[in-house]
Amino acid sequence: METMQGLTRTHRCGDITEGDIGKTVTVMGWTQVYRNLGGVIFVDLRDRSGLVQVVFNVDRNKEIFEKADTIRNEYVLAVVGEVVRRDEETVNDKLPTGRLEIRATELRILAKSETPPIFIEENSNVREEVRLKYRYLDLRRPDMQRNMILRHRVAKLARDYFDDNGFLEIETPILNKSTPEGARDYLVPSRVHPGSFYALPQSPQLYKQLLMVSGMDRYIQIAKCFRDEDLRADRQPEFTQIDLEMSFVDCEDVMTLNEGFIQKVFKEVLGREIQTPFPRLTYQEAMDRFGSDKPDTRFGMELTDLSDIVKGCGFKVFAGAIEAGGSVRAINCKGGDAKLSRRDLDGLVDFVKIYKAKGLAWITVAENELKSPITKFLTQEEIDAILSRMDAQVGDIIMLVADKDTIVYDALGALRLEFAKRFELIEKDTFDLLWVTEFPQFEYSEEEKRLVAKHHPFTAPMDEDADLLETDPARVRAKAYDLVMNGNEVGGGSIRINTPEMQERMLRALGFSDEDAWERFGFLMEAFKYGAPPHGGMAYGLDRLVMLLAGEESIRDVIAFPKVKDASEPMSGAPGEVDAKQLRELSIKVVE
């Protein structure tokens, strides 16, 4: 292979402009397309910036032409040549460089390539497992490179914006003490302390609070975080946060500053102006209207509570759910009679069962009649009240679920999203941003059979609810807020507890004994004894934010080397076995 010795790249391929006509340039990159038309060879040369056409003419230089005839796709080339205007019949207006070409005077083949196992092209329709196995090739594709560039720009904007607002970028430790309260930790054995383990951070939460105790006032970090949990399309075992914390602030201070950041990102990255302040919904309003604490408000079909109408009605499923403390709620699928067959409706019954609903009732409003398996159990007065409240018109289908509130919310919230997808109710390229506030401090874990923190145990309760911590913790609301974009939580945070007394009360409410609380979190509560300022902050999921800005459906498409569902990495083969000597040094024995 030839080398670059004596050559210096003067231009990236996509940066050639009409101002370069007549100049001699040196470009380097990969062969996207090779075409031999007899006495002329055309090569589309590609690098991160784009494509440029290179021309080799046998009549101008036979030696270079013959060398060019050995080129194949993905060969790495260095080309010296003159920039000229293309003949009018060969212009390609789809390319920024489509009116120009480089007439080659020198060619060096820097590296050859075997036939790639995937196509290096825009929106390649290759199975994801193959793409991830050959990720270094997949990342050559223009759409993937755009995603990586976008990610870089968002991270840089974060650093610049928060720096302009007085934040310091400070790194926090990767090797931490395990303080399990939330997802499962990734553990790292200590060679120096046999039998002891570090934990990889699920977030920098405690350290960033300690930085506020330290008087750093405003902190930011592009932080790597780790959670050993089952994966979904928008989750990875290792992920990246834009993490920040501020002293002497309340909820409004944090939200207002971060609205400015999102506004800047949209303007600089997407060229869009967005209005602030963003709409605010309390948690309860979001659940009541949309069945979700991360509501997609780009379309209607909101939930409606019918419990007062059907309370004590003749349909035992409805009456029983309300007597048990639950509710009956519904959504109106406008024009659903023309869109959904009886078979479709039966399939929707199975759909809501995924969310633990026992069933799905419906009322179809047909011309001069109602079609429904439940209207025979209801009085005409009850039916009329339902139709009126649901604003039902001919052709609509009212979908009803009766159960515990949590199940009703989950089932109908998912159903409205399913309808939005099926019937294309969401206009493309739209963005909807809002804050959800006043989250519950606690939620009940069926797995652990106890209250757990809705966000984390360091979130401050709302002042007016603090006295309920010991007497009625389920009613306590938190000073917490989530930023929602298009039905996705892209960031969240809270005002934190800043006294050891309140932190002890919070941990007691979560079932920690005082001894256990101090064993796990004593270093934080000890720090609070020496004067901790009121403080709060939030963290963005950088991966998810970039995914939405890029219009992708999976965060794997905006992470350079992601893991798959079983937390493995197909390209490198991680995780892998280690040899016995390494295990002995760490005092670890693998049990079959």
Image: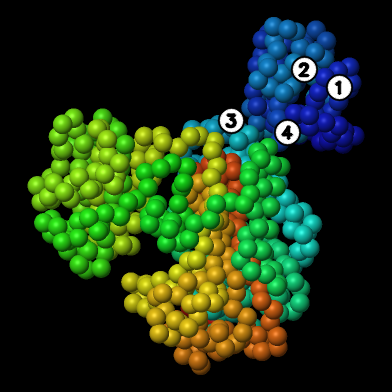
- The answer to which of 415 and 91 lies nearer the viewer is 415
Image quadrant in which the N terminus is located = top right
What is the distance, in whole Å, between disc 4 and disc 1 at their CAs?
Answer: 16 Å
Tell me the residue at 40%/75% (across/down).
Answer: 474
Residue 585, horizontal then vertical, whole percent: 59, 79
Judged from this view, the residue extending furthest toward the left is 376
Q: Residue at x 81, y 36 (%)?
A: 3
Q: Earlier in the sequence, mark 4 or mark 1?
A: 1
Q: Reply above or below: 368 against 283.
A: above
Three-letter amino acid code of the residue under disc 3: Glu
Give the residue type that dot 4 points to.
Answer: Ser
Q: Is residue 283 left or right of residue 45?
A: left
Please tell me which of labels 2 and 1 falls first in the chain: 1
Q: Residue 427's spot in the image, x, y percent?
A: 48, 34
Residue under numbered circle 2: 100
Residue 309 in which image quadrant: bottom left
Please name the residue that numbered disc 4 is placed on.
49
> Which of labels 2 and 3 is toward the front?
2
Which residue lies under the disc numbered 1?
20
Q: Nearer the viewer, residue 16 or 70?
A: 16
Residue displayed at 58% across by 51% down: 278
Say if 70 sits above or below 506 in the image: above
Which label lies toward us, 1 or 3? Answer: 1
Graded by Cα atoms within 10 Å as few (under 14), some (14 to 19) or many (20 or more), the crowding at tag 4 reads some
